[in-house]
Image (cartoon, helix red, strand yellow):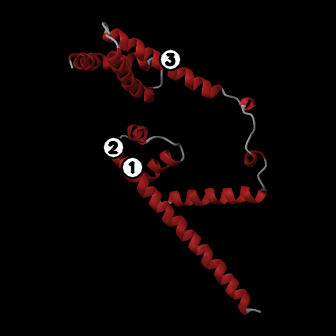
Amino acid sequence: MQYKSTMESTYLKCSALLAKVIGGIVKNEDVEDIVQETFIKSYEAGLKQEIKFERTYMLKTARNLALNHVSKASERKNQSLDEMKDLPGDLTSKSLESQIESKERFLNFCRATDTLSVEVKRVFLLKKVYGMSQRDIARHIGISESTVEKHVAKGLYQCSLYLQQLVESETQQVTSILKHGETNK
């Protein structure tokens, strides 16, 4: 138990320094995750072996994790289309009809999001279109993660209601046209 308290106290004392070191290597939004991962890795290593210089060990671990993070991000960014073996068929040969349907679905989605309040719409689009995590959205906007979750749920609910009403309206129009056509025969 003595070890646990020294590793934790060392982490608490140097977490700001860890963040500063990591911040010079990675983007600001990745710093906190890497600082936390540094503690976890250091703690796990400390359970397996004795670490005499915990602060130095944590600083080196943080630096290595940050460099690995940058390296992995760079590899993903540099992957070219030439390296991909086969493109999915729907990326290379879409019919005109499916393109129109896709654009129509997108327009309907845009119309549905236009019915949302400004706050809900902003959070909803950051989550669903840009794929941001709740934590990142909360930090970016300056609201709690709980509020982000509520806004996303509200956005989903209101958009699904709008789209459901749209489908029902279109169904009624088709039914009306079909009935009108039968009465003219």
Dot 3 amino acid type: Leu
Name the quarter where the C terminus is drawn: bottom right
Relative to residue 57, is residue 100 depicted above or below?
Answer: below
* Neighbours of disc 1 within 10 Å: few (<14), some (14-19), many (20+): some
Q: Residue at x 29, y 19 (%)?
A: 11
Callout 3–callout 2 Cβ contact below 8 Å: no
Q: Are marks 1 and 2 in contact (CB under 8 Å)?
A: no
Task: State which quarter of the image contains the N terminus.
Answer: top left
Residue located beneath label 1 in the image: 149
Could you tell me how far apart the alpha carbons at marks 3 and 2 are, in whole angstroms? Answer: 30 Å
Q: Which residue is situated farthest in the top direction here?
A: 52
Amino acid of disc 2: Ser
> Does 133 appear above or below 23?
below
Neighbours of disc 2 within 10 Å: few (<14), some (14-19), many (20+): some
Which residue is at 35% across, 22% downward?
A: 39
Q: Which amino acid lies under the numbered mark 1 shown in the image of this protein? A: Glu
Please name whichever residue, 140 or 96, is drawn nearer the observer in this view of the structure.
96
Q: Callout 3: few (<14), some (14-19), or many (20+) C-alpha neighbours within 10 Å?
A: some
Of 56 and 161, nearer the camera is 56
Q: Which mark is residue 72?
A: none
Say whether disc 3 or disc 1 marks the residue closer to the N-terminus. 3
Q: Going by the image, does 131 lie left or right of 174?
A: left
Instruction: Tell me the distance, in whole angstroms, between the alpha carbons under discs 1 and 2.
Output: 9 Å
Q: Is residue 173 left or right of residue 48?
A: right
Q: Secondary structure at mark 3?
A: helix
Q: Which residue is mark 3?
A: 67
Residue 22 in sight here: yes
Q: Residue 172 location in percent, x, y?
A: 60, 79
Disc 3 to disc 1, C-alpha distance: 32 Å
Residue closer to the observer: 184 or 38 = 38
Residue 16 visible in the current orientation: no
Instruction: Residue 144: give its label.
Output: 2
